[in-house]
Image (tube, rainbow, N blue to C red):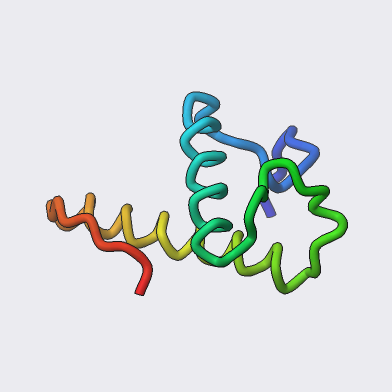
Amino acid sequence: MASNNNSGSNNIVVPEAKQALNQMKTEIANELGLTNYEQVDKGNLTARQNGYVGGYMTKRLVEMAQRQMSGSSGTGGMK
């Protein structure tokens, strides 16, 4: 198993992407009906609510990578 010097699993590899990721997180939370997500104490949300946001972020990022790898420029949303 390869070891790294990072103490957490949620380290951003490209720091310049942090703002875009936070914006995506807020947009997805709003789409899921979690209003004011950026001001909410995430510890007061259920694991399911927090998991949905992370899961949809992952799904959208994978879709974006697949489109980029295939050369497609389509902008599909969540379905």
Q: Which residue is more in the foreground, 6 or 29?
A: 29
Q: Residue at 86% x, 59% y: name it.
A: 44
| Whole-percent x, y for residue 3 in the image | 71, 43
Quadrant in which the C terminus is drawn: bottom left
Q: Furthest residue to the top?
A: 16
Q: Going by the image, does 57 lie left or right of 54? A: left
| Total numbered labels | 0
Query: Dividing the picture into quarters, in which one does residue 52 lie?
Result: bottom right
| Whole-percent x, y for residue 78 in the image | 37, 68
Q: Which residue is more in the foreground, 58 or 22?
A: 22
Q: Residue at 67% x, 67% y: name it.
A: 51
Q: Residue at 55% x, 66% y: name it.
A: 32
| Whole-percent x, y for residue 45 in the image | 80, 62
Quadrant in which the N terminus is drawn: bottom right
Query: Dividing the picture into quarters, in which one does residue 29 lie?
Result: bottom right
| In the depicted structure, whether residue 11 falls above or below residue 57 | above
| In the depicted structure, whether residue 38 falls above or below residue 75 | above
Query: Dividing the picture into quarters, in which one does residue 50 lie?
Result: bottom right
